Amino acid sequence: MYAKRKKRKKHKKLTWQEVLLIIMVVILALLLIFSRGFRAARRVEHMDNGQDGVVLAGMPQGWFSTVPPPKQQMHLDGHLQWHGQHHHQALQDHMRHKDLHNKHITETRHAHTHPSGDGRLYTIHDRDMMDNASGFGDITTDMLLGRIDPESDEAGFEEISRKYANRKGMFLRREAMEAFTEMHAAAEKEGLQLVVLSATRTFSHQKRIWENKWQGVSLLHGGILATDIEDPVERSREILRFSAMPGTSRHHWGTDIDLNSLQNSYFEHGQGKLVYQWLKANASDYGFCQPYTAHGKRRTGGYEEERWHWSYKPLASDFYHAFAAQISYEDIDGFDGAETARAMRVIEDYVLDVNKDCF
Ligand SMILES: [Zn+2]
């Protein structure tokens, strides 16, 4: 009798365990479904709170977060809206966090391929990045850093005809070339000549330009020699007024051109002034924008004004956002003075601080 009651009790207890087990399985299933969505939302959140490591390393974190439900394009859209609405300081803060974020992605890429790394979460993370970055998912790190060969048939470049350029052997991405051809024809109708002085530059080309300045082989603007500046960061700052560090030039992207003269003063008088006025009024009709406008409310840092530098936005905008998402300071290396890149904040203050018409 006693044993029988005990047995029944045991049986009843087991039933409760089964019920509990079912409830727990249901809750776990619901949590798994929600956590997939929250993972995307967390990425947006950590960009602003700067706690990448914590958020990404802790899988369960965010399950009970108050972050609103995610949208498919949240990462990209947030980024785009962000640029449109916030002021410069916010850009700098954002990009500083973004740098941490990018650094983490770079590390996670290693984890991804490293057998001892915890690749699972990162694989999901990277895949989500690519999904959200749909527009520029095929822009590789090499393309962003200028480690390209524009002359190869597969690269998608076209040589610029002598009709449009001051010399042979310059290249643009095909789509940018087509747009430029149309813009050139329209300007010509107004009696204005657009002449390409520089277009796509590879990493090694930019390295040559940079190191010639760094080593005092060529003069800087204002006729000074970089070698007269002892402090490497200050030397870097002076060169960066008009020249990009290798790996960080928009000319790597195959979307940007320098027109007519590399002196702002040319665009203040006579034909140069007419050309500049025409470009400001009409270039956007052909997809072109001026990334380096005068410093002021819209752009407070980075390169000086460059009235000659024009960018084919439909492509360059994708490169811009891809650069922001994929490049970190570890990628900027392989030339004299590369160690000053971080101190000079070349990603935030130079690559990304451009006229907002260009992204
Ligand atoms: Zn340029």
Image (spheres, rainbow, N blue to C red):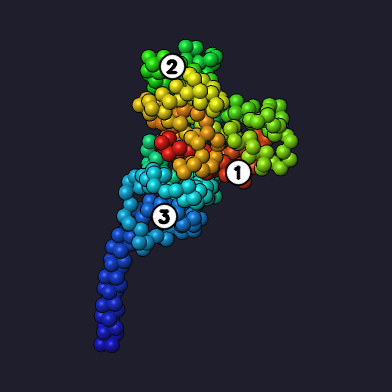
In this rendering, the answer to whether 183 lies above or below 34 is above
Q: Quadrant of the C terminus?
A: top left
Can see residue 137? no
Q: Is mark 2 within 8 Å of ligand 1?
A: no
Give percent across and percent down for residue 159.
Answer: 48, 16
Q: Amino acid at mark 1?
A: Met
Residue at the top extreme of this rendering = 163
Query: Residue 141 or 120: which is nearer the viewer?
Result: 141
Whole-Å distance between the Cαs marked 3 and 2? 49 Å
Type of amino acid at the residue the image marks with label 2: Leu
Q: Give the spatial CA distance, label 2 vs label 1.
A: 38 Å
The mark found on residue 113 in the picture is none
- Image quadrant of residue 357? top left
Identify which amino acid the numbered label 3 is placed on.
Glu
Q: Is 104 positioned to the left or the right of 223 in the image?
A: left
- Per the model, the C-alpha gap separating discs 1 and 3 is 27 Å
Q: Secondary structure at mark 3?
A: helix
- Specify whether 210 is left or right of 84: right
- Side (left or right) of 235 relative to 306: right
Residue 358 visible in the current orientation: yes
- Give the foreground label among 1 and 3: 1
When the figure is inspected, residue 177 is found, relative to residue 358, above or below; the finding is above
Q: Which residue is mark 2?
A: 192
Q: Earlier in the sequence, mark 2 or mark 1?
A: 2
Q: Which residue does the numbered mark 1 point to in the structure image?
A: 344
The residue positioned farthest toward the bottom in the image shown: 2
Residue to which mark 3 is pinned: 45
Q: Residue, x 51% and y 26% (percent of image)?
A: 268
